[in-house]
Image (cartoon, helix red, strand yellow):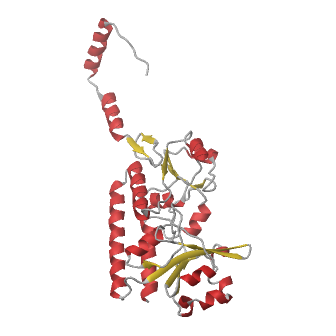
Amino acid sequence: MRRIVLTAAAATTAALALSACGTTEPAADDAKKTAERITLTDSTGVKVELDGPAKKVVGTEWNVVEHLITLGVDPVGVADVKGYKTWDTAVPLKNEPKDIGTRGEPSVETVAALKPDLIVATTDLPPAAVKQLRKVAPVLTLKAADAADPIGRMTADLDAIAEATGTTAKSDELKKQFQAKLDEGRKKLADAGLAGTKYAFADGYVMSNQVSIRPYTSGSLIGAVSEKLGLKSAWTVKGDPAYGLGTTDVEGLTKLGDVQFAYVGNDGDAGSTPFTGVLAKDKVWTSLPFVKKGNVHRLPDGIWMFGGPQSMSKYVDSLVAALTK
């Protein structure tokens, strides 16, 4: 800021003029503006400064979009809107945000045209893309996932977005509701004699006529929530350090033994339903103990397995209903 030096006489005249006007509104406005400023440090150690609670927000990943919606902030821009509407109907969009491109490569030009106050991204977005987006608006980059503490990571991201948008009271409410849902679900399973039940959750895909199965280990968000319900993970495969996801095939399922098995597919994605598709006539699949006993549960479409408290609450309700029916 350019400094202006006044002579003594000029300074006195200026002071008298201000006194005569009797106004201090600019100073008050400046103080208010300073008080409203928000400073955050994101998951990458970058300081993010906002003039006030962000209202026009863009989300580059579906979990942060879900967080925004549950906090009462309708995002103006969302990566892959069609995909979100397909996979996260548990927490639907309430507005018609602009599609900013793919989750891995959002369009900087499209985002810039929205003139956002804030862009919320995750560490899954390439650093080069984040660098470009920072030229448009402040970017709050959150850690995508953490297998060491999946639920803690989810709530930490929710809190960070809440702080940036001035919705911390709503965040506190959501966390309390989620804990109550966990307590309720755990009690229902215990009352049904299912505490400690061996359980495995997975999703699967068919690509080039090959079936790939993805186990959700204890390090996954789904796995951590399941264990909070009193279930015991049956997976022996190792998950990745971020999402807690493993890899296996149909033969790998033979190691599970007699378990309760659940999965999420999607009728809007033909390749995501192998358990009721190509595996229905597979001899290995049909010979599995849990398949023979009918202990295979397809949970409702639209529960985003990497979402926030509301998606996880709907997962709890759906799983408890499936296991206790």
Figure check: 131 above or below 14? below
Total label count? Answer: 0
Please identify the quadrant where the C terminus is shown.
bottom left
At 48% from the left and 54% from the top, the residue drawn is 143
- Residue 37, how many percent across, how many down? 37, 40
Q: Is residue 88 rendered to the left or right of residue 226? A: right
Please identify the quadrant where the N terminus is shown.
top left
In the image, farthest residue toward the bottom: 293
At 48% from the left and 79% from the top, the residue drawn is 234
Q: Nearer the viewer, residue 257 or 23?
A: 257
Q: Is residue 173 rendered to the left or right of residue 232? A: left
- Residue 16, how many percent across, how many down? 26, 14
Q: In the rendered image, which quarter is residue 154 located in?
A: bottom left
At 68% from the left and 89% from the top, the residue drawn is 281
Figure check: 279 above or below 222? below
Figure check: 26 above or below 212? above
- Residue 145, how many percent across, how many down? 49, 59
Figure check: 73 above or below 254? above
- Residue 242, how many percent across, how many down? 51, 60
